[in-house]
Image (tube, grey):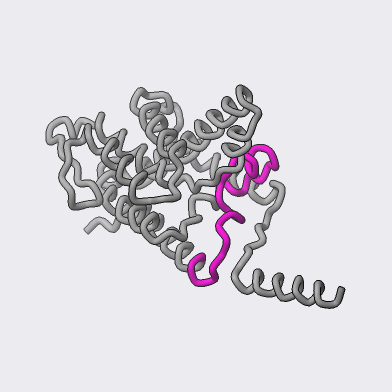
Amino acid sequence: MYIYPVTSLLLLWQSTCFGLLRWYSIDTSGISLSYEKVVTEREYWRLVFGWLSHVDVLHFAINAISIWANRHLELYYGSLEFAKRTLVLYLCSNLIHFAIIYRVSVSNRGIVSAGFRKAEWNGFSAIILGWAVIQVEQPIWKVDPIVYLLDFIPLPAYAAPCILFTMIQVVVWNSSLLNLVSGILAGYFMNIGLFDWFTVYYMFCLLQWMVVGCFLSKGFPPRFDTAHVRHQRRALEAFGSSVV
């Protein structure tokens, strides 16, 4: 019996962090991704933790079910190759996202540009969209071109990315349109072989440098704004105003 180690680990991380964020009412803006925080303020550690910043129940549920629904991909590719491709999808989709925001910022320096730079996302939905695109080009699905959306809805493989994209946009109110588009583009780039040079060895090297960069980047370790902290801050502010 295959235990799907990478899939299981992803589910465990997502579920644990989701539970902690909900239990302590942590404000996800302290760890989520944004152009202003990662690029402008150089808080690179957010690339390591940002994909775990889920507090919306529907958003988490769709991501968790989609992770488990893709377990056959780990069996098809092997655990290390599956982990490598997942990492590439995550980093590539975020780089595309940053590049789009940078282009908008250069061409438009007004309110729209400021909103794009401050917009927050977590980046994991892009991985799911990226894998949906990758499945379209795999030989096994050309023989039997049916995939199961959320592990129980049979769909033609070529239609799955569009339907999943629409479903996330409609159901998850705080999902990032740019992040989903970036995930689709990242999956397309993998399909045309743009990252064939990136081996498992490079993956381990990159992970090591990501850990080093995390500790050296600005604002690490993060300070979590919990409900208790917010309550204390309001109490101090009220006390200060009463004294004055």
Work out whether 196 lies above or below 39.
Answer: above
Location of residue 179 by image quarter: top left
Which region is colored magenta?
21-48
Q: How many labels does the image show?
A: 0
Residue drawn where x is 26% and y is 40% of the image: 163
Q: Where is residue 9 in the image (x, y as percent from the top left)?
A: 40, 57
- Residue reaching furthest left? 144
Q: Where is residue 144 in the image (x, y as percent from the top left)?
A: 12, 36
Location of residue 187 by image quarter: top left
Residue drawn where x is 30% and y is 40% of the image: 77
Q: Residue 153 versus residue 145: which sits nearer the camera?
A: 153
Residue drawn where x is 56% and y is 43% of the image: 119
Q: Residue 139 versus residue 22: which sits nearer the camera?
A: 22
Work out whether 35 lies above or below 30.
Answer: above
Q: Tell me: 174 left or right of 221.
A: left
Q: Residue 186 versus residue 107: which sits nearer the camera?
A: 107
Residue drawn where x is 48% and y is 62% of the image: 17
Q: Position of residue 188 (x, y in %)?
A: 36, 28
The quarter of the picture where the C terminus appears is bottom right
Location of residue 177 by image quarter: top left
Q: Tell me: 214 left or right of 5.
A: right
- Residue reaching furthest right? 244
Q: Where is residue 11 in the image (x, y as percent from the top left)?
A: 38, 58
Q: Is residue 204 magenta?
A: no
The quarter of the picture where the N terminus appears is bottom left
